[in-house]
Image (cartoon, rainbow, N blue to C red):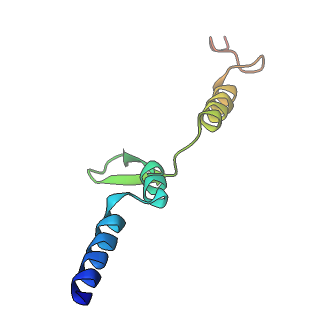
Amino acid sequence: MNRTTIALALTTVLLAACAAPTPQDTKLAQAKPECDREYQTGSMIAKKDCTPPMSAEERQRLQNELAAKIRPNASNPAGGGK
């Protein structure tokens, strides 16, 4: 009787431990890095560039920053300077 009780208790504990994923596993799955493949000019070998995922606010800030750098201003007109 003693061995049977221990065996049943051990089986129950093992099955309960395997039943649900841990919160850490779900966080790791959501935090996968974003990877891009870039080809150097004249090379057939791709370079893999991985970055951590960005939030929507951070992505928008970087887009605005890049647009401000590219945007023509009064000293650099877009139509050329004749």
Q: Residue at x 66, y 10 (%)?
A: 82
Q: Quadrant of the N terminus?
A: bottom left
**Does 57 sit above or below residue 36?**
above
Q: Residue at coordinates 28% horizontally, 54% vertically from top-left?
A: 45
35 to the left or right of 57: left
Q: Nearer the viewer, residue 15 or 46?
A: 15
How many discs mark residues in the rendered view? Answer: 0
Residue 15, placed above or below residue 62: below
- Of all residues, the one furthest to the right in this rendering is 74
Q: Residue at x 26, y 74 (%)?
A: 11
In the rendered view, tell whether residue 7 sits above or below residue 28. below
Quarter of the rendering containing residue 69 = top right
Residue 23, percent across and down? 48, 57
* Residue 64 coordinates in the image, percent (x, y): 66, 28
Question: Which of these two is toward me, 32 or 23?
Answer: 23
Q: Position of residue 66 (x, y in %)?
A: 63, 32
Nearer to us in this view, 50 or 11: 11
Q: Relative to residue 35, is residue 60 drawn left or right?
A: right
Residue 32, given in percent of the width and then of the height, sits at 44, 51
